[in-house]
Amino acid sequence: MSLWPEHIAGFTTHARRGAIRNAFRYGVDYVLIDPRAKSGPILFSRNRFNLFSVRDRDHGGTRGRGQGIAWAEGVFGRAGLDTGTIDILLLTQPGFLGYVFNPVSFWLAMEGDVLRAVIAEVNNTFGDRHSYLCYRDGFAPIGPDTPLEARKIFHVSPFQDVAGGYRFNFDIRPDRITIRIAHENGSEGVIATLGGPRCALSNRSILRAAMRRPLGALRTIALIYWQALILKLKGAVYRGRPAPPEQEVS
């Protein structure tokens, strides 16, 4: 499979539950790529500088020293998925003028239009990364109403405990992508969503995104710190960064 890069110009929402509530909704730009393909519009590059870019070293394995699709194939293969029968796609925020920060990217194991497994590659603002491997027994098809659960073991927000678990829902359609992640920890937790239509990535769509949401990934991290300030002013308790988990994938 060789997928022309796609542009998901959509929205992300976060809603915090519990004693201190907070919610926001922001526009966001993701790309969906075939990690083996090298072609794309002039303003998008693989493994080199451009207005929009995706570099293998930023994905798959140790943060900043990633191995790209070879890493994802290894993770899926060790879990028992026959990687010879699937296509692996990467859904991620592209770098903007070389700057990269991704709260979460997704490696999608597709058999045609059927989703078989997902690696959710999570980064925090402290330089750490952990990935959650999600699949059903026997790698049965994953539909929008198929919740996949994982125990939270990675520190993401300094205003949340490393406790409880995640419930993932993936709705991957030919024309649209919708992802829902619920962190549940008793009466506390956060519900986050990402969604938008699938369209061809073009020079025009890249320029439109650059004007509509200037600075790309740099804007993302600025908004993260802005929301952290809001939570602090609301009285949320700051938790220090614990040591990241020893295992790379859970």
Image (cartoon, grey):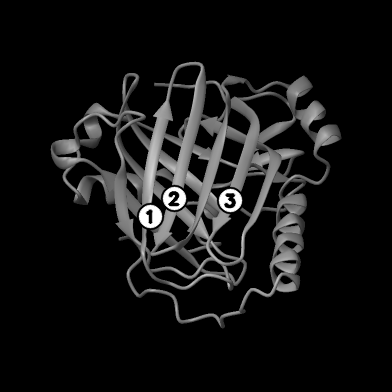
Residue placed under numbered mark 3 in the picture? 15
- Single out the residue that lies furthest toward the left: 138
Image x and y of residue 68, in percent: 45, 48
Comparing 23 with 133, the one in front is 23
Q: Is residue 66 visible?
A: no
Residue type at mark 2 is Ala
Q: Earlier in the sequence, mark 3 or mark 1?
A: 3
Residue placed under numbered mark 2 in the picture? 182
Residue occupying image coordinates x 53% and y 66%: 156
Instruction: Answer with the quarter of the image where residue 42 lies.
Output: top right
Q: Is residue 126 visible?
A: yes
Left or right: 157 in relation to 106: right
Q: Give the Cα separation between the discs numbered 3 and 2.
A: 9 Å
- Circles 2 and 1, Cβ within 8 Å, touching? The answer is yes
Q: Nearer the viewer, mark 3 or mark 1?
A: 3
Residue placed under numbered mark 1 in the picture? 166
Q: Give the Cα separation between the discs numbered 3 and 1.
A: 14 Å
